[in-house]
Structure formats: C-alpha cells, structure tokens
C-alpha cells in the first residue's frame, strides 16, 4: 500500500501532518510526500527522508492562478501518480486539494481524499449578506466543485466550512464528508507552562502568532493594543509572524509603523513558537475565519486563556467565559474590552488557562483526531 500526501508548503508537513503521516506509516503504508520548492526547504526534505518517507518535488505556485503553471502542476501530479501508483491520495490546502484530486481521478487512484484546512482568500467575505464573488473567487469555487466531485471522502475542520460548501453547491448532494477537530495538537509536546512570577499575571502579556494577513485580524490586534496601552501602559503585546505572498498581506511599511509606535514586540518568524507562548499570559487570534487554528490549540495546551472571534473555526476552540472570550469579527472595541477583563481581574488568567488545557485534552488531542480520520478512511 502506498499513500501519497500532497502539500503546498514543505515547512507545514511535519508540523501539521506529521502525526497523521506517522499513523499511516504504522498502518503499513509506504509514504510518499510531494510539495514544491523542496530545494529551498532542504532541511524539511532531509527530515522527511530520515523518517523513511519518499519525497517528490513538483512545480506549484502557492498563490495566484496562472493557467499554464497550474496545468503544469496537474500534469506533474498525474505523471507522478502513474509512476508510483499510490493506493491512497490526500491533498490539503487549496491547490493540492484541487489539482491533486483532479490528477488522482485521471490517474485512477483507488482511494482519493481531500482535507479542507481553511478557506482563505478564495472565500473571503462569503459569510456576509451582500457577498459578491470576484472573478478569481468564481474560478476557485468552480474548480473546487469539479475537484471534490472526484474524491471519495472530504474532511472539514469545522462544521461551518462544511455547511458553506453545501449551501454554495460546491459539494454534490451525495458527497461523503466528515468533520474533525482540526489538526489536533500533541498534548505531551505542548505541555502546561506555569507562570514564573506574580508579575506574569499582574502585568499581562498578550500574544498573536499568524501570517501577517488582514484576514488574520492583525490590524484589529494592533488597534486594540493601542487602546489598551493608552489606558494601561504596563500591558505588553507580542507579535510572531511573517509577511506572506498573498493578496491580503500586511506590507512592511505598515508593520514598521506599528513597531515604531511601540504597539508590540515583533518576534518575526519562529520555527518553534513554544518560547513565545510560554512568555505570554493571554493568546489572541482576531481572525475572520479559520479551519481550526493550530496556534490557538498550542496555546490552550500550554495553559493559556484565549481571546478569539466568534467566527468559523475560531469559535470551536473557546467556550465563552470558560477558557476565554469570543468577540465579533473586526470588532476592535469588543476585542480591547475582552483584553481589559484580564487586566482588571488577573485571576482569570490562571482559571481560564487551566480550562483551556482541560478542553484541549478532551477535544483536540492529535491522536484522537487522527484516529477518527483513519476510521473515516476505512483504515
């Protein structure tokens, strides 16, 4: 048996799918992994090879829709599948799902799966009543519809994304879907990090980890930080992330203006986010929409309360008033008010941090999440 995993970003494979791939290997599968730019991510490539996986490079542009380049991606995936003859294929993120599913259908792979980890720019604004699709969005929705019709099972990381695909008729009426609790998190790797001193509670330190995109709520985070710091100068704000090649990206000038204004400490991109989470007291993600946000799960596992939005994917991680607070999307004043609750009542940080850990153990343990996926695949 051979299992081919298709990814768009080599650095994400072990971080987000490592436990799943290991579980498949333990089932007796020969594991093949394909992604673009493995020459750039040589360390990630070598790490995969050391684990016994077979790695293949493919031409794929992570963003944009150039018909010629995308046709090359489909062709390369088709030829790869005809060569290695996988029994099972799964893609995750937009292009691997769409072009991987199409190629797998053409190559007559017996078992074809798709993992919808988040909707991103292709569905930005889809929850709004006056939603009007751009031409690019129309193309992506049509491609999703064609590609998913050729899969045997689709996995969604929250029920809202599944419902949206059904309401937009992207899924066929007889489509086989399963909702899982995100990618899960290794609760032994991300262990509870107690606060070192009383100052860790009395002087709150907020943290956001994200690609620097508008729809991650980075601007709202900066605006709320200004409101809080004007009133509570001792409060601290950290930002971990990087400028991404995306139509919705934050530019360097805007980032520099926030840093020079002293709104937050900018950590840049981190390979290991655990030190940043350990240094924080409250984790914040004001995202407009997620699959299920992995950084939130990591912060929960390490015993941190959460402030996030009442948006698809995000709302799955917080019981409002139990392990954190839910605020409306794009609502800066409400976001700042939620932050202020922890400042005026620091005991909530300890109380809700413990609740976060309990919730992640009950719902988001990576082994339980992967077991549910394997069962849905019939493995």
Image: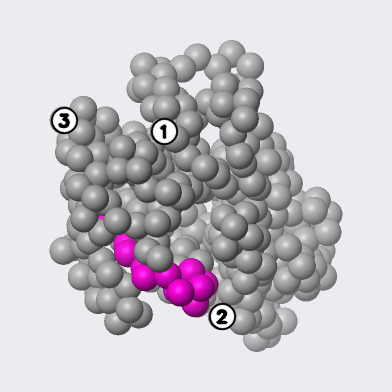
Q: Is residue 225 visible?
A: yes
Q: Quadrant of residue 147?
A: top left
**Mark 3 neighbour class, 10 Å CA radius: few under 14, some 14 to 19, many 20 or more:** few
- Tell me what residue is drawn at x 40 percent, y 66 percent: 1
The stretch drawn in magenta includes residue 193: no
Gap in Å between the C-alphas at discs 1 and 2?
A: 36 Å
Question: Which residue is identified by label 2?
Answer: 189
Residue 147 got which mark?
Answer: 1
Mark positioned earlier in the residue sequence (3 or 1): 3
Q: Residue at x 25, y 47 (%)?
A: 77
Residue 312 seen in the figure: no
Which range of residues does the magenta coloring cover?
22-36
Q: Quadrant of residue 44?
A: bottom left
Q: Is residue 82 above or below residue 353?
A: above
Left or right: residue 299 versus residue 349 is: left
* Crowding near the residue tagged with mark 1, few <14, some 14–19, many ≥20 C-alpha atoms within 10 Å: many
At 36% from the left and 68% from the top, the residue drawn is: 31
In the rendered structure, the answer to whether residue 112 lies left or right of residue 167 reads: left
Question: In the image shown, does 302 or 97 lie closer to the viewer?
Answer: 97
Is residue 28 rendered magenta in the image?
yes
Earlier-in-chain disc, 1 versus 2: 1
Q: Mark 1: which secondary structure?
A: helix
Distance CA(mark 3)–CA(mark 1): 18 Å
Residue linked to disc 3:
68
Residue at (56% x, 80% y) in the render = 189
């Amino acid at each position: 048996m051979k299992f081919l995993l298709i990814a768009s970003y080599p650095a994400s494979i072990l971080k987000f799918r490592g436990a799943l791939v290991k579980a498949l290997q333990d089932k007796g599968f020969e594991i093949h992994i394909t992604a673009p730019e493995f020459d750039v991510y040589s360390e990630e490539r070598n790490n995969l090879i050391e684990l016994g996986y077979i790695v293949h490079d493919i031409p794929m542009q992570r963003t944009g829709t150039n018909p010629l380049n995308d046709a090359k991606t489909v062709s390369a995936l088709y030829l790869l599948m005809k060569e290695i003859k996988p029994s099972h294929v799964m893609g995750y993120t937009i292009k691997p799902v769409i072009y991987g599913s199409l190629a797998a259908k053409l190559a007559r792979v017996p078992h074809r799966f798709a993992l919808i980890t988040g909707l991103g720019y292709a569905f930005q604004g889809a929850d709004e009543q006056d939603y009007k699709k751009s031409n690019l969005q129309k193309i992506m929705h049509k491609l999703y519809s064609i590609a998913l019709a050729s899969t045997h099972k689709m996995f969604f990381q929250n029920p809202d994304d599944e419902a949206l695909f059904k309401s937009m008729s992207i899924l066929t009426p007889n489509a086989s879907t399963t909702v899982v609790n995100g990618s899960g998190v290794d609760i032994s790797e991300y262990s509870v990090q107690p606060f070192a001193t009383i100052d860790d509670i009395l002087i709150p330190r907020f943290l956001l980890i994200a690609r620097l995109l508008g729809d991650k709520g980075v601007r709202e985070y900066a605006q709320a930080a200004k409101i809080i710091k004007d009133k509570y100068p001792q409060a601290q704000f950290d930002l971990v992330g990087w400028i991404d090649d995306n139509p919705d990206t934050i530019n360097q000038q805007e980032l520099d203006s926030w840093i020079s204004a002293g709104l937050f400490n900018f950590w840049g991109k981190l390979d290991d986010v655990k030190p940043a989470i350990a240094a924080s007291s409250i984790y914040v993600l004001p995202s407009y929409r997620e699959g299920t946000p992995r950084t939130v799960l990591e912060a929960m596992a390490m015993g941190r309360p959460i402030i996030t939005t009442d948006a698809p994917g995000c709302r799955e991680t917080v019981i409002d008033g139990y392990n954190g607070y839910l605020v409306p999307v794009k609502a800066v004043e409400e976001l700042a008010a939620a932050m202020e609750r922890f400042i005026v009542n620091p005991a909530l940080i300890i109380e809700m941090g413990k609740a976060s850990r309990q919730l992640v153990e009950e719902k988001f343990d990576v082994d339980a999440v992967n077991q549910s996926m394997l069962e849905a695949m019939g493995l």
